[in-house]
Amino acid sequence: MSIWRVLLSILFPPLAVIDKGCGSFIITLILTLCGWIPGVIAALIILNNPKN
């Protein structure tokens, strides 16, 4: 996980996970619309997942 990806996930979480798949993008987008902090947390979890 690069520093640029972390900064992007803090500023606009759905854009940071757009290459991880449509499901990750939609989940992060919905959580970001519900509140900024849940979106950031979801993006960081998705980016930190070692399986992807």
Image (cartoon, grey):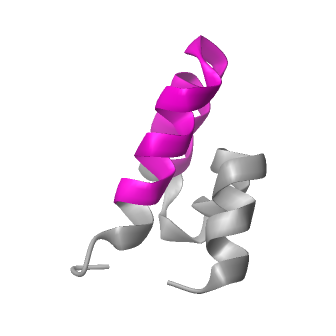
Region of the chain picked out in magenta, as a range: 25-45
Residue found 38% across the figure and 59% down from its top: 46
Mark count: 0
Q: Is residue 49 found left or right of 47 in the rendered image?
A: left
The quarter of the displayed image where residue 45 is located: bottom left
Whether residue 49 is situated above or below residue 16 in the rendered picture: below
Q: Residue furthest top?
A: 34
* 40 in magenta: yes
Q: Residue furthest left?
A: 51
Quarter of the figure that contains the C terminus: bottom left
Q: Main secondary structure of the magenta part?
A: helix
Res 2 → quadrant: bottom right
Compared across the picture, whether 37 is left or right of 48 comes to: right
On the image, the x and y values in percent for residue 36 come to: 64, 26
The relative height of residue 16 versus residue 27 in the rendered view (above or below) is below
User: 19 above or below 30?
Assistant: below
Q: In this rendered view, identify the residue nearer to me: 37 or 43.
A: 37
Query: Residue at the location (65% across, 81% down)?
Result: 3
Which of 35 and 22 lies nearest the eye of the viewer?
35
